[in-house]
Image (cartoon, rainbow, N blue to C red):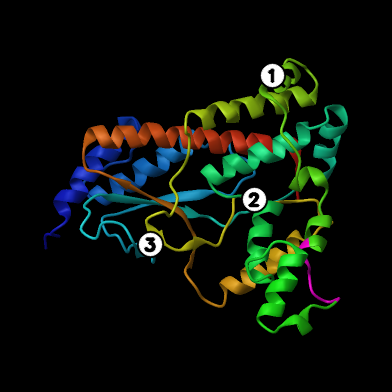
Amino acid sequence: MVDKDDGKWLQAAKLCAELVEDDELVIHDKTSARDIIGQSLSVWASKHCADIQVLDKFELNASLEQDAFGLEYEGESDKKCLFIGFQSQQTTPFINVKAKVEMLELAHPGLGRTAVSIAEMASYRTFTAFTPQVALHHASYLYWYGTETDEELKEEMEGIGAEDEFDDDMLLPSQFMESFPKYLVSGESLEREVIQRIASSKEPAGEVARIILSIADLIDQDARLPDLRNFYGESAFFSCYVGTGEDMLGRVLDDFYQNTGNGGEFTDMYGVAEVDFSKKAFLKWKSETEKGFALYTQLDRLMRCIGDVQ
């Protein structure tokens, strides 16, 4: 029986074969076009992400169907392309940044804050880390009706007649923020010239500064990995959890996962790329995604420098 999409799968297989060398694929008489696609994507991603040691692992899955990933598609309904999904392997670590970031702050005030800030920026462009800022966003909707200050929350609760719930047992925005050291939630980043001076040092801070500059350069090149912009859904997984072990991150995380268990459009997908069936478009996507892999790799290096995996 001939599948009506066999021609498209074969076309996609020829494109994906451009990702690897001929001797990197295992091909025999029964190897299908889909097998070639799967092998090519796996070998390619593994090669470019070989140095990732702590951040969540992921795998690539290809489809011709818009609904293959269990999410409602909101893009062009008749769009013909190869959909490549980036799926979490759910190996998310907790990274305690308290000791190492405080050492950075002691040696070079502002460097720890800069490292945390640029790590967040890199994660937003690749696979989001569950940082205090991300936890604050979720807490705002889990507990505070979309508000972010005690005053706003009290006004909102009075407006909906729920002021009796405003008591000592409730987690307030101020309590949440006060549970974190300032370098995790506020403060200015260092200027590039200052980071460059630190980067010339042979001390541990020098390595952190060099990685920060590498990440900044990749961001300037618009390095990123696919997100879910044309799909209705939200990833339930994160590249890592970032905190001090003495804060409210765990409480928000527990309630976030309890909320995902109650339904909604949550997914284990980080993003889905939509790649046109032309060699030019495919090679452009390949180049852009490899920059995204490089950014994720540098983020992994940075997280190892500023935190301890627990």
Observer-nearest of 276 and 19: 276
Compare marks 1 and 2 and give the one earlier in the sequence.
1
Image side of residue 162 versus residue 65, left or right? right
Magenta residues, as a range? 168-173
Label 2 secondary element: loop
In three-dimensional space, the C-alpha distance between marks 1 and 2, rounded to whole angstroms, equals 29 Å
Among the two numbered marks 1 and 3 on one chain, the one whose residue lies closer to the N terminus = 3
In the rendered image, the vertical position of residue 166 relative to residue 15, given as above or below: below
Mark 1 neighbour class, 10 Å CA radius: few under 14, some 14 to 19, many 20 or more: few
Quarter holding residue 121: top right
Q: Position of residue 45 (x, y in %)?
A: 44, 40
Residue 193, numbered label = 1
Which sits in the foreground, 8 or 30?
8
Residue identifier under label 3: 69
Mark 3 Cα shell of 10 Å, populated few (<14), some (14-19), many (≥20): many
Q: Can you identify the residue that label 2 sits on?
A: 240
